[in-house]
Amino acid sequence: MPLTQVIDYFNAHLEAFNPAASLRRHACFHYRQGRVWGVLHEMTLYPSQHPILDLDRLDIAAWEATVVVEGGNGQQRPRPAESLYFLSWDKEDVIFLDRFLRVLHALNHLAEHGADAAPLVVDVHWRHVQAVEASHGSVFESLLARLGLYPEQVVLRLSGSVLLAETHARQAAQSFHRRGYPLLAQGVALGTRDVDWQALKASGVRWVTPDGSALRLARESREHFPRLAQWSRDARAAGMQVWWPGLERPGDLGIMSQLEPTRVSGSLLEAFVKAERA
């Protein structure tokens, strides 16, 4: 089915995202000249993607979805997507919002790369996980089916700290995993214990990223390298793919050669990927 028809269908059936959400009456998708965007109330959402490079194969392992939010309360400058989850919406609207964003990214993925591209990495927000009691991933699976996509083609990114701290989050992850979604734990702390690595694995997690301080520490001093390298070794020993995002400086590649990740991303690599695909 052409993308225009799929978008028309979704706009006519937004209750499929969550029939109890009032936000569905103020949302829509748009598609024009190969570009996809979304609207929520007075805000416009512009999705984009960034390549994640597999260092063993030297090709694209996945595409990371991001979104720029403009407008709302008279603001015309971009605002972080995280802020959307803390507007004055109830849990039903949060459920709708999270699914709407993921479908927006999936639509953009199809517009840019087609159905046979490398997997797409999208976020599942903790407020969404809290709001849904059971059968996590089933509604999104049915929405993906309308796009001709399968759970195996979409990597779901969840907070690593929340997964380790909250039983409900681990149960949600297991539900996602049973449906075939690859799972990514974001921001797993340095010094994570083996028992916690095993808990992540038991929850279905197969990708991990370090916490936000890791790359900063690596840039500051080599004295941090043993602890950072141990984190990577522990992750790989637990069967994880280790992804280091945020590579932006020329020296970052030298750092990565010593920390031995399996996947990397960042503006430093995007020019390389574009040149390879030209």
Image (tube, rainbow, N blue to C red):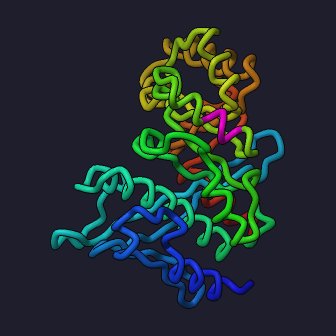
Comparing 117 with 225, the one in front is 117
Residue, far left = 74
Residue, far bottom = 33
Judge whether 244 appears above or below 101 on screen: above
Name the side, left or right, on which 235 lies relative to 158. Answer: right
Magenta: main secondary structure: helix
Name the side, left or right, on which 147 lies relative to 185. Answer: right
Judge whether 218 appears above or below 100 on screen: above
Q: In the picture, residue 10 is in which quadrant?
A: bottom right
Q: Which residues are magenta?
A: 173-177
Q: Position of residue 132 (x, y in %)?
A: 48, 44
Q: Position of residue 218 (x, y in %)?
A: 49, 25
Asked whether residue 188 is in view, the answer is no
Q: In the picture, residue 253 is in which quadrant?
A: top right
Q: Residue at x 40, y 71 (%)?
A: 24
Residue, far right = 57
Comparing 117 with 166, the one in front is 166
Q: Position of residue 62 (x, y in %)?
A: 69, 52
Judge whether 46 appears above or below 197 on screen: below
Q: Residue at x 71, y 86 (%)?
A: 2
Split into 4 quadrants, where in the image is the N terminus?
Answer: bottom right
